Amino acid sequence: MKAYVLINTELGQEAAVVKVLKDVEGITDIFSLYGIYDVIVQVEAESMDKIKEIVFNNIRRLDSVKTTITLITYGEPILRD
């Protein structure tokens, strides 16, 4: 399974949050963003329960994380012709 998590951090804490997220098992990509959200991470795990565990225990509980939105994918990637 794969999910994307949009993260809002406390002002000026983006780099600190990214530093912690780099060591979280299951997070495969991290990008800083311009706009409403500060960071997006890609999470890959073998089950929905494992994704939920990563999001709740390793992302949302960080002191500098204000809010998150989790987008869970389904099916195979849609490829362009």
Image (spheres, rainbow, N blue to C red):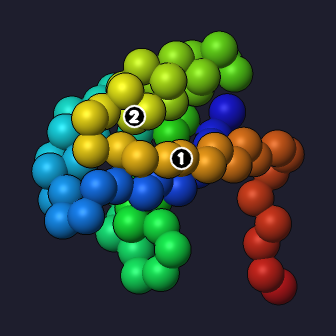
Q: Is residue 33 left or right of residue 18?
A: right
Q: Residues within 10 Å of mark 2 (few under 14, many from 20)?
A: many
Residue with the mark numbered 2: 59
The image quarter containing residue 61 is: top left
10 Å crowding of disc 1: few (<14), some (14-19), many (20+):
some
Q: Which mark is residue 68?
A: 1
Where does residue 12 sit, x and y in percent of width and height?
18, 65
Q: As shown in the figure, which amino acid type bears the numbered disc 1?
A: Thr
Q: Residue at x 65, y 14 (%)?
A: 49
Q: Does the image show residue 43? A: yes
Residue depicted at 25% across the width and 64% down the height: 11
Residue drawn at the location 50% of the way across and 24% of the way down: 56
Residue 1 position (above or below residue 72):
above
Give the amino acid at mark 2. Ile
Disc 2 and disc 1 in contact, CB within 8 angstroms: yes
Left or right of 11, for residue 4: right
